[in-house]
Amino acid sequence: MDLATIAWLFAAGFLGAAINGVVGAGTLITFPALLAAGAPPVVANGTNTLGLSVGAWSSAFAYRDELSGRSRLIRPALIGSATGALFGALLVVVLPDTVFEIAVPWLILTATALVAVQPLVARRMRVQGSPRARSRGRLAVAIGASGIYGGYFGAGQGVVLMAVLGWLYDSSPQHANAAKNLFAASANITAAVVFAVSGRVWWWAALVIGLAALVGGTIGARAARRLQPGALRITVVLVGLIATILVWWRW
């Protein structure tokens, strides 16, 4: 890679990871950047997943206080996320890209709508009982399902996770965002292993994006922690709508 390409991918990796730290959809920055740098679509997908996994872990670490004391609830869902991502990544290897390409904008749009109505659902849950006391199994299944999508492509996975977590984990956007970063990191690194083994990673590009994502993910998460719950929810919805439009336009 020449210096211009390195700078281009570094900027994309930084911005994509920072967006992921706030809500998600950073793939909509890094994936097109990799295509523009000359990577074939499947290789761009694998490279993007590996590079941004670093940013997801750094974002999760920045949110470690919000994750403290919740291992009993999080652990089954973390396993579900990795298992789902493994299946999703294997789909990339064996199925045509068009299968999920058709579904991607609808998935993001649906997730955005769920985030928008999440306060109403959370209010109903508070009347019926604590969601954390009765939804551990459902949370693991739902996170596992989102992991399939994340392992396959992942654009807007953060929006999907925020919708699920707001319903089944915690109505607080900040606590949901903390768990979102952890589950996204688990899904990304699992899928990245599959892509690496199957030869679908451009290693130099992944290194550049990973280094940028390490910084961008931390900065994005710290910025998100300063947002008020209402502002964070509005950000999630806006990013989800923009992601839907961009994916529809791209495909």
Image (cartoon, helix red, strand yellow):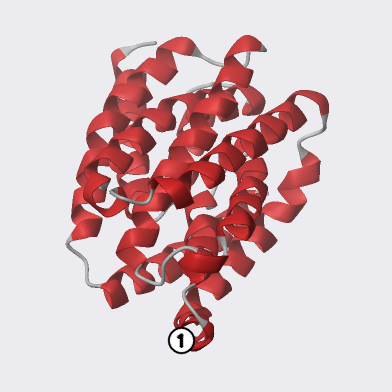
Dividing the picture into quadrants, the one containing residue 22 is bottom left
Q: Where is mark 1, residue-wise?
A: 123
Task: Give the left or right position of residue 32, taking residue 235 as reference.
Answer: right
How far across and down, in percent of the image, does residue 75 sit?
Answer: 48, 42
Question: Please, is residue 27 above or below residue 227 in the view?
Answer: above
Q: Residue at x 56, y 73 (%)?
A: 114
Number of numbered discs overlaid on the protein picture:
1
Is 246 situated above or below 54?
Answer: below
Q: Is residue 69 visible?
A: yes
Q: Is residue 161 left or right of residue 177?
A: right
In this view of the protein, can residue 25 be seen by the observer?
no
In the rendered image, residue 108, in percent from the top left (x then y), is placed at: 59, 60
Q: Is residue 163 above or below residue 214?
A: below
Q: Is residue 88 left or right of residue 118?
A: right
Q: Quadrant location of residue 135?
A: bottom right
Is 179 rendered above or below residue 86?
Answer: below
- 82 vs 46, nearest the viewer: 82
Give the residue at x 17% y 62%. Answer: 226
Q: How far across and how far down the image is residue 148, in percent?
A: 67, 42
Q: Horizontal and vertical percent for residue 161? A: 51, 56
Q: Residues within 10 Å of mark 1 (few under 14, many from 20)?
A: few
Q: Between residues 173 and 4, which one lies in front from this camera angle?
A: 173
Q: Amino acid at mark 1?
A: Arg
